[in-house]
Image: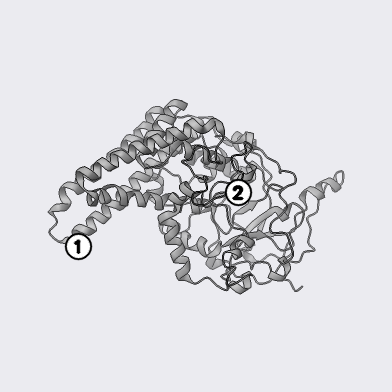
Amino acid sequence: MASTAIRRGQAPKFASYASSSSISPSEAPSIVGSLAASEKSSSTSLSSMGSVEQETKKGVLLDTFGNEFELPNFTIKDIRDAIPAHCFERSYLRSYGYVLRDLMCLATTFYIFHNYTPLIQSYPLRCAAWAFYTVLQGLFATGIWVLAHECGHGAFSPSKFVNDLTGWVLHSALLVPYFSWKLSHSKHHKATGHMERDMVFVPKTRQEYTSKFSSTAHTVAELGEETPIVTALNMILQQLFGWPMYLITNATGHNCHERQSEGRGKGKENGWFTGVNHFNPSSPLYENKHVHLIIYSDIGLTIAGFLLYMGIQKFGFTNMLVWYFIPYLWVNHWLVAITFLQHTDPTLPHYYPEAWNFARGAAATIDREFGFIGRQLLHGIIETHVLHHFVSTIPFYNADEATEAIKPVMGKHYRSDTKGGSLGFLKAIWTSSRWCNFVEECEGAEGEGKYVMFFRNRNGLGVSPRKDEDVQGEAKQPNAAGKAGIVDLAEDSD
């Protein structure tokens, strides 16, 4: 089999990944071919060479840009010890101050537009003004969503009762089932980057991806390049409906519900009317002890739905559409964009159980930059996400300092794409959609490396997928029935 060998010391110029910013797709040449499978990791310890060699044996792992990847070896304790103690402190006054600020922004914006937009004589300009209103309210409401997210992690205040009551009220107002989301989101944090247990944006494997086109193609080579219009349509559908689809069908979450310890997942899988959702007390996403919490969530949604119904009866559907429902769609858009870009990037690995542990999963995220909007209106959820996955109880107003503290510990494993600022963030939605179609093991991977997955695509961008003839006859996915890796759930801060 012909292959292109990239040996240590002879890596292409883009193989050094900067710790503070990711390499632009335009700077990452396309790599054709595959790596030589003969290259193996070695140990320099003479006293324990055999065991260390077995442990570190992985072959050469390349991300989609062609950067060589090494498995992180720091621990969650290393991370926590590096963070100043005061970063963990939570303030009732400060947190509620942000809630009041965001509510005031919502109320003031409504007052201004409701009273002064009708004075605009031009109908097109009035429509444009109301459209701008929906964008602003969507951003302010997303800020409220983020504060409820702080409540779900216990980062809002030292009181669990205060956190849950505040989070339940704020999220219910945004049609979010607070406790249902809190529980599944906690599982996401406990299994980030885990191919079989993560709860959001679990990437499709090569086989899952090609199976979508089984009527027309059976291999990646047969698929050919995805047209830009198809990419754009998929993006639009994802941004409009991704959030409700996640709540209703568990879209992008794992589909291994048969493993639910209480038998709730027997015969169930993600999809419509399968019982796998965030509203059903018997959903396999939860345990029996959570039933009352799911009911509380549903009660919150029922109250919010009733108030919206009363609003429609009093003010009419058109007014409520502009005042609430279109801003609600903007909130959905920002939630999906933020989460998608936090966990989908050409540099990010995903793991099967044999290679996963908590610290590795938490490091498989990326910080981005959204300027004033991200840091002020959205409370830094975009800019400090890596830190958040290591210690989610740190309040957002201390996250910048804590992020700087953990960078020396993470070294090259800290990822941040800040190029282009706010426009760069928006552009990354397109970039990740084009570059990240599916994941597969790297050519020449061995040992633990066979259970480390990286994104590949059908569009001729970056490292080429493995050749179809090389994967034919192989198992659909690595054997995940063996050891569960270094499962380190006790270190999760949720």
At which x and y percent is residue 387? Answer: 54, 42
Instruction: Tell me the tag on residue 124.
Output: 1
Looking at the picture, does residue 340 appear above or below residue 101?
Answer: below
Label 2's element? loop
Query: Residue 77: x percent and y percent?
Result: 64, 35
Q: Residue at x 35, y 39 (%)?
A: 173
Q: Nearer the viewer, residue 261 or 133?
A: 261
On screen, residue 276 versus residue 10, left or right, reads: left
Amino acid carrying label 1: it is Pro
Please say whether residue 397 is visible from this viewpoint.
no
Residue 356 in picture, x, y percent from top left: 67, 46
Residue at 54% x, 38% y is 186
**Colouring rule applied to residues:** one colour
In this view, the residue in front, 330 or 398, is 330
Mark sitting earlier along the chain (2/1): 1
- Judging depth in this view, the residue of 222 and 309 nearest the camera is 309
Whether 162 is drawn above or below 450: the answer is above
In the image, residue 391 sits, relative to residue 418, either above or below, namely above
Where residue 342 is drawn, which disc sits there? none
Q: Amino acid at mark 2?
A: Gly
On the image, the x and y values in percent for residue 342 come to 51, 51
Q: Please give the residue where the numbered disc 2 appears in the rendered image.
A: 193
